[in-house]
Image (tube, rainbow, N blue to C red):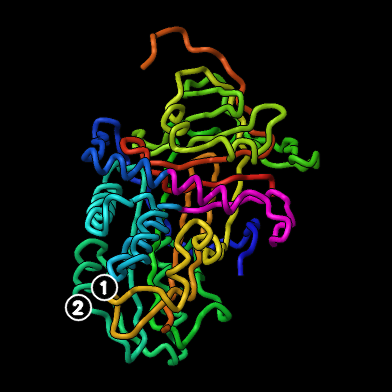
Amino acid sequence: MSSCSTENNAEPVIDPVVEPVVTPEKNEWKPITLTRAQQEMVQANNEFAFNLFRTVALPRPAGPCDGKPQSIILSPISITYALGMLNNGATGETAKQINDVLGFADTGADGINAFCRKMLTEAPALDKLTKVMIANTIYMNKPYQLKPMFVELAKQYYDAEPETRDFHDGLTRSVINKWGNDHTNGMIPEVLSEDAFNPDAVSYLLNAIYFKGMWSQKFDKANTKDETFTGEDGSQRQLPMMHMKDHQFNYAKTELFEMLHLPYGNGAYAMNILLPAEGKTLNDVMRGLNNETWRQYRFGNPAIADVKLPRFESNTDQDLVSIMSDLGMPKAFTDKAEFPNFCNVPTCIGLMKQVARIKLDEEGSEAAAITVIGLETTAFEPHEPPHVNFHATRPFLYIISEQSTGAIFFMGQYVGE
């Protein structure tokens, strides 16, 4: 069942990490080089990211959020990895729908595999001050067996090592959750609740994305003070507001939003904050946001900014079955699904969900997401930078992306609770 985002004050037990001493000279950013076809894949996949987030975030009166905007975080690229891996088992209309939804209609499984492999191997090495982990795995229920070619592709492109278990052993759910906890540095201790886990499932495919980035320009904790955050409904609450004066950041302004570009580490990754213009709402921004506007404005132009940004934490547990079906791949969830290259019995997707979490403070951001699929049988002129006030004291959107490709790793909105 889908649920709205909530704050989570429980602190996971995480081994202490000693941050390395890295000088700029030792932390050179070497951009990811993509072919023209791969560049087009990124752009198409980012369009999927905006469609996905729009579908989840726009209020639905009959939904669990009762039409009210909620704090949400999603990882579109995590869904791409999970479906990309499963797509190697699909054929016919099922494969076509998966490819179309992800934006890879003209690429096919081989192109998706190559793109995912490139990002998996190169994204973690772009910045020594930013930790990125991408992991994939497959759990298979006895006595079902994966097709040998599927196993080969999963290992070759996704570093996924399938494990066969008896799902009725009373331990498998804990094993899956431990895998998720281990590959998100303790941020997501449970991806499958007792109600969500099906011991009769054929298989569970999982992708985990973990990100921890230190701001290139950190906020001084001494400047963090409680200030008023005003919701779209006019409600107000006191939140710890980080404050930084007179620092140069890239900035863009349109009739829909103001955007501030906050880099991490050596600049290989960044968070873009999108603050709706006065009189505009989060929904207005989401309806006008697509890959073209993202490409046009994501870098912005230099400005001297007075920045206020709340220190916050939020999480989302999102059912994706109806979402992905509505986006254009309904067949995968029916008894007519075509996954003949997956395993030795006919299968369809019975469960698809994502659990994601973000923590943002003066030092930087930490974010993680796990996507699980359960299968069942059946250039500008130099000038003096302008001075701007960018005070995120009302609901805003945010995007964490890799800069050389523009690939969106996380997308979220924060509404103050």
Looking at the rendered image, the disc whose residue lies closer to the viewer, 1 or 2, is: 2
Instruction: Find residue 69 and name its label.
Output: none
Is residue 327 placed above or below 255 in the rendered structure? below
Quickly name the residue at label 1.
161
Q: Earlier in the sequence, mark 1 or mark 2?
A: 2
Query: In 3D space, how far apart are the residues under numbered discs 1 and 2 (Cα atoms)?
Result: 12 Å
Quickly name the residue at label 2.
148
Mark 2 belongs to which amino acid?
Answer: Pro
In the rendered structure, the answer to whether residue 227 lies left or right of residue 38 reads right
- Neighbourhood count class around disc 1 (C-alpha, 10 Å): few under 14, some 14–19, many 20 upward: some
**Residue 216, quarter of picture:** top left
Stretch of the chain drawn in magenta: 47-75
**Residue 316, quarter of picture:** bottom right
Depth check: 218 or 337 in front?
Answer: 337
Q: Residue at x 28, y 42 (%)?
A: 126
Mark 1 belongs to which amino acid?
Answer: Glu
Is residue 357 placed above or below 305 in the rendered structure? below
Q: Residue at x 44, y 68 (%)?
A: 331
